[in-house]
Image: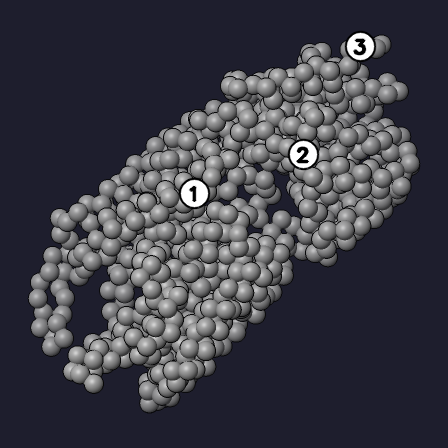
Amino acid sequence: MSRRAREHARAQHRPGAFRHDIEGLRALAVLAVLAHHLLAWPAGGYAGVDIFFVISGFLITTILVREITSPQKLSLPDFYRRRVRRLVPAAAAVLSATSAAAFIIFGPGRAVTILEDAVWSFFFLGNWRFAASGTDYLNAGTAVSPLQHFWSLGVEEQFYLFWPWILLTGIAVTAALRCTDRGMRVLLLLFIGAFCAASFAFAVWETLNRPTTAYFSTFSRAWELGAGAMLAVAAPWLSRIPALGRAVAGWAGLAGIAASFAVLSADSLFPGPAAALPVVSALLVLAAGTGARGRSHNRAMWPLTNPGSRYIGRISYSLYLWHFPVIVFADALFPDASPLPVLALTVLLSVLSFHWVENPVRHSRWLQPRYAYRERGRRYRRPAMEPRPARLAGLAATGGFLSAALIAVALQTTLHTADTPAAADPPALDARAPSAGAVTDGPGPDPLIAHTAALRTALGSSTWPDLDPDPGAFTEGGRNAKPAEWIQDGCLGGNEALDPNPVANAGHCVYGGPKADRDLVLYGDSVAMGYLPALRAALSADEWRIHVFTAAGCAPADVPQVRIGGEPYPECTEFRDWAVQRIGELAPDLLVVSSFRYDPALASRATGEAADAEWSAGTQLIHQRLAGKAARTVVLSAPPEAKDPAQCVTRFSSPGDCESALPDNHQLRADIESSAAAAGNPEAEWVDTTAWFCVEGGCPAFAGSTTLYADAYHLSAAGSRLLAPLVASVLEKDGVAG
């Protein structure tokens, strides 16, 4: 062997030798995530993030163990400075650009929400914000944040924050026990293995009980980074694997990764235990290359080590940062656009970001200590910062982000001042005009005819009217557009339904005049709440008291349900039993029932026909329990699912961009619920409200100048009041309305 070949072989075996296969593995992971978000294929492409976690745990622990056990020792300030230089400049550039684009494309309401996401993400806490919003019922049906993918960076940085201290503790214990290097690594493996086992067990539990939180949780993901850490500790033993064994392990890992992309889906129990497949597969690939001869291993693992894969892996961080904002903004501006321009723009921005921001800052002297040390201990002075383009780019990105934050604070203050009075002061019921839904004696024109004409006009419109409420000013979750009875009065949970204390809750969520002698009970979930403004506008407050029995995410169907986020919901069963009892005690003149129809949140996790059968049986059972408890029962079907106005109404969109079509299973679900209600209580009147929102399958976002929805599922307060004449015509039978 020549001298040059021997030097190359030694370089490949030395600690910290560059791994081309890891670059390729990064490329594979980021391409899977990008394809999953852009094309919704492969179904399990989201597992690319888990591969990143394994790589990060492996590399960071390799560095930490080497530095902790070296004569020079570990400098934690230097470690954290390197993390900041590696991650923050490119992230700040993306956060700044995304925040600015949000104010250009969307209205100030959603733009402020995106900026708030950016602030959380800048401090690597986005995963907890998105976990909270994903389980917050107020945000159900709202548009996805273009910064939601920053959750994974939050998990990694939180892990990096504590992991050096955990390793230091473990190594200090082994030093106190006077362990050899081998003994130290054995004890570290046991220590980290116990840590991973605890995190994995927690991930399985949290996935079963709180799947949305589990997906974003650092505690449920720590075992994935810990698995990579265990591999790093075991590196000396992995160098003994023969070449054939390495090839088998490497290709088995690639096959496992491909299988995880193919077999995992949105229904998989993720991250526990389903994430074990991509994690173990990534470990096999990393183990195959640990201590391997560079050239021979590179030839064996050519899918990962070819120049194309290596370059994509090199820019994978920038690709990951840019891809999701580009996809979200492109979907808002050009919902039917080809994915090719979106991909091209993502790649262009990523390449520019890598070569002009990420890489220059990483190789600059920014944030380096003022004094550095040579190997022989000689100290020399270095400037902490230099006036290089990399520094200027980082400062510009940070300055732009802070400027956008200041603008947003001012806008948020303005929005809050403008929105609060309108939400806090719903229309007075005793002063309603006939056009608001009053019913006069004798037959009159069918209100559905005029309403249908307004829907047709909206479907044929090429320009936006002056919408009220303005979707561009919607605050988070459409809060300021939803009924004040929900947002301010707290009638969707927090009312007497969830705290059945008649003294503490006397008069709470009961609407009508003090002399009213007729009772109406509105029973259901947030969809039922959406009809409340229409009911209040359609009925005379002098004659009717409206009792609101609604709970978030708790449909009337008598089946075990779970909360948004998948948590058990025993309170729903308690609320349902209480509501049935209370309705029987009131014996109201009118009972109005409504609930969300799509994707029932069943505790049984049943899907397809099994879910339909369970939902149908539960619907029939609740109507059997309610039969005879009210003089009249009316069931209003749920509004069809729509597009979130805060997402589709942009400064560049047209009304057609917000039109939606009825789902393929719309009529099937309607038939299931109507037949189940009739089977449970033949006297119940089923009202299909589809014609209130759609004409010949097309569903506009507005009628006249009124925005119908506050998000994808819930009516706006103004949209509900617009339906008052239609509700009044339904209730007109036997002189109920008037």
Q: Residues within 10 Å of mark 1 (few under 14, many from 20)?
A: few
In 3D space, how far apart are the residues under numbered discs 2 and 3 (Cα atoms)?
Answer: 30 Å
Residue 227 seen in the figure: no
Q: Please, what secondary structure does the residue beneath circle 3 have?
A: loop
Disc 1 vs disc 3: which is toward the camera?
Answer: 1
Q: Verify CB contact (< 8 Å) between mark 2 and mark 1.
A: no
Residue placed under numbered mark 2 in the picture? 662
Q: Nearer the viewer, residue 313 or 187?
A: 313
- 642 left or right, relative to 54: right
Picture residue at 77% right of the left edge, 48% below the top: 612
Q: Amino acid at mark 1?
A: Leu
Read off the residue under disc 1.
Answer: 340
In the image, which disc is placed on residue 444? 3
Residue depicted at x 38% and y 30%: 104
Work out whether 211 lies above or below 683: below
Q: Which mark is residue 500?
A: none
Q: CA distance from mark 2 to mark 1?
A: 28 Å
Q: Residue 195: image x %, image y %?
A: 48, 73
Residue 519: x and y, percent? 81, 28
Locate the N terminus and report the quarter of the image it occupies. Answer: bottom left
Helix, strand or loop at label 1? It is helix
